[in-house]
Structure formats: structure tokens, C-alpha cells
Image (tube, grey):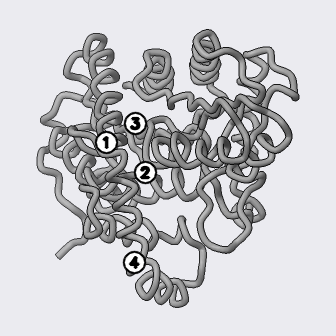
Amino acid sequence: MSRFAGQSKKIHDCTAKTGVLLTNLGTPDSPTAGALRRYLREFLSDPRVVEIPRLIWWFILHGIILRVRPKKSAKLYKSIWTEQGSPLMVISQQQKCKVEKILTEKYGDKVLVDVAMRYGSPAIATALDNFQAQGVDNIIVLPLYPQYAGPTTGATFDAVFNKIKTWRWIPSIHFQSGYHDHPLYIAALADSINEHIQVNGKPDKLVFSYHGMPKYFLEQGDPYYCFSHKTTRLVVEALGFTKDDYVMTFQSRFGKAEWLKPYTDETLTTLALDGHKHVAIISPAFSADCLETLEELVHENKDIFLGAGGEQYHYIPALNDNDQHIAAMIDLIEPHIS
């Protein structure tokens, strides 16, 4: 039997359509140890995410991590879980609905919009199958990671093409590899910070906290570190801040290897010990609030700063379904609608 999947419809019998796929990293189906074990197994088995020789990593993953970490992670997820489910999934659906509404008003049923996760469900392969079944002949993939990184954007590219390479007929495809310096994205970040300052006052330090990455990835050519710095520089310029007004850090490190520095938790301790009483923190790498923001930044790092002598700590939310953020997505999508 051929390895190439057949088309569910003859493409020449279909009205031309564009499929827009918004993607994010993923989330467990529930805040339980079992769901976390399934999710972490898929996530941490990807060589884009962990670049340790496969045999060695297999023993570490299955012998240690998947025996210990799911229970601990489940407890953290329970602390942020909502009645509607995972915050990341809820916000992703809200983003999808807003993008879909705007594009439907402009293009009618010629444009389909869906959302998928790189790990867990709804899966990228399932969304692509749905596009294929509806006769889509032009696909736009927008991974919602502003700063390209191999373990996020690169891994999404792998999932998309691992599926599409099995199709007999390949549609036109546009893959957006990032938007770290897109003017509408930068303006949305700057405006969200200004709005926060109007309510809470200007902090002693504004902390830009990006998701961490092993330093080895940067040494091998991953541009994430550089793109993160450019995002920070552009936002600072838009705010009119000086170098004394802000600091840039990296959070969420895992394991014993050296990660990108400076580390968020250590920096917050240092700021407090140096006499800075008021900080505000924002994480431009996240397009939607999730465990790393709602638990790590809202609670864990707040405790670190206040415990070291700080007095005021504020988290500035991710852009989520902010209208300016949605406008940036539309601006990235529209040039590729056929």
C-alpha cells in the first residue's frame, strides 16, 4: 500500500480555500499525574527539545523524570486550572475566535481558522487533516511564539511537514517563523506596559523575563537569544526607557546544564537585596498566559522577590486576545491569503 494519503475530495471539485492554523506549545488534558505523564513523554521525547544522545536520554526520561515530575507538575497545574480547562487552551480558543471573526467578515467561507498544539491535543496533524477534508489548497501556519526557537517554532515546522509529506497532493504552504520585531506586536507590548504603569506607577525596574533555553542551543546557532534581545530593545525604545529602567532575564530552567543568563529568580533576589522595592515583570515570549506565567511568575517569583526584601511585585499579563495582538496576527496572515 502507498504511504501517501489519499485526498478525501478531488481538489479540482472544490472552491479554493485558505486554512489558517494557529499553534502553541501544548497543555495536558487535565491536571492529573497521568495526563502530565502522557504530555511530558511526548514533549520531552522530541530531540528538538532535549539534545542529549537518545539512548542516554531514554533512560533518564523513563527511569527518573516520568516517575517523579508528573505528580509535581500536576499539583502546579491544579493551582492555575479553570472551570473551562487549561488557561493556555482557553486563551488559544479565544484568540482563534477573534481571528476567525475578522477573517470571516472579510473573506467569508474562503478562509478557515483552526488552533492546534505541538504536543498534546488538539494535535497539528488532526487540524491539517480537517483542512484537507475541506479542500484547502493554501495553508498558513502561524506558531504563536514571537521569538523563533528550535524547540518551539522549529518543532512545529517538523510536525506540520511530517504530516503533509504523507499527502499525495501538497497545497501551497506559508510558515511564519516568528514576529519578534513586528511593529504591531511591539506596540501592543509597549501599550500594555504603559497601561500597567498608569494604574500601578512606574516600577524601580521593569523585568523582561523570557523562557529559558540551554546555552548550548545558542552556541549551535539558535537565534532565540538574539531575537529576545531585539524585542526588548524595541519595546524599551517605544517606552522611552533608559538602560537603568529595565533588566532582561530568562526563566524556567530545567536540569543541571547552564542555561541562558541572567536567571529571573536570581535577578529578582539581587534587585531586592540592592534596594529595589518595586518591580513589574512581563514575559514577551508568551503569546498566551500559561503555567510558566500564571504559576512561576505570578506566585513563585513574587515570593522570591518579597522574601528578599522587595515590597511591590506586579505581573503584566501576556497579550492573550488583546485586540492589538489580534491585529498583529491578522497583519501576519493576510498577505498570504490567496
Mark 4: secondary structure: helix
**Residue 140 badge:** 3
N-term-proximal mark, 1 vs 3? 1
* Residue positioned 87% across, 28% down in the render: 243
* Residue positioned 70% across, 31% down in the render: 279
Q: 57 or 85: which is nearer to us?
A: 85
N-term-proximal mark, 1 vs 4? 4
N-term-proximal mark, 1 vs 2? 2
Q: Are marks 1 and 4 in contact (CB under 8 Å)?
A: no
Image position of 131 (left or right of 98): left
Residue 222 x %, y %: 69, 56
What residue is pinned by disc 4? 66
Q: Relative to residue 156, is residue 181 depicted above or below? A: above
| Label 3 packing within 10 angstroms: few (<14), some (14-19), many (20+) | many
N-term-proximal mark, 4 vs 2? 2
Residue 268 x %, y %: 72, 44
What residue is pinned by disc 2? 25
Q: Are marks 1 and 2 in contact (CB under 8 Å)?
A: no
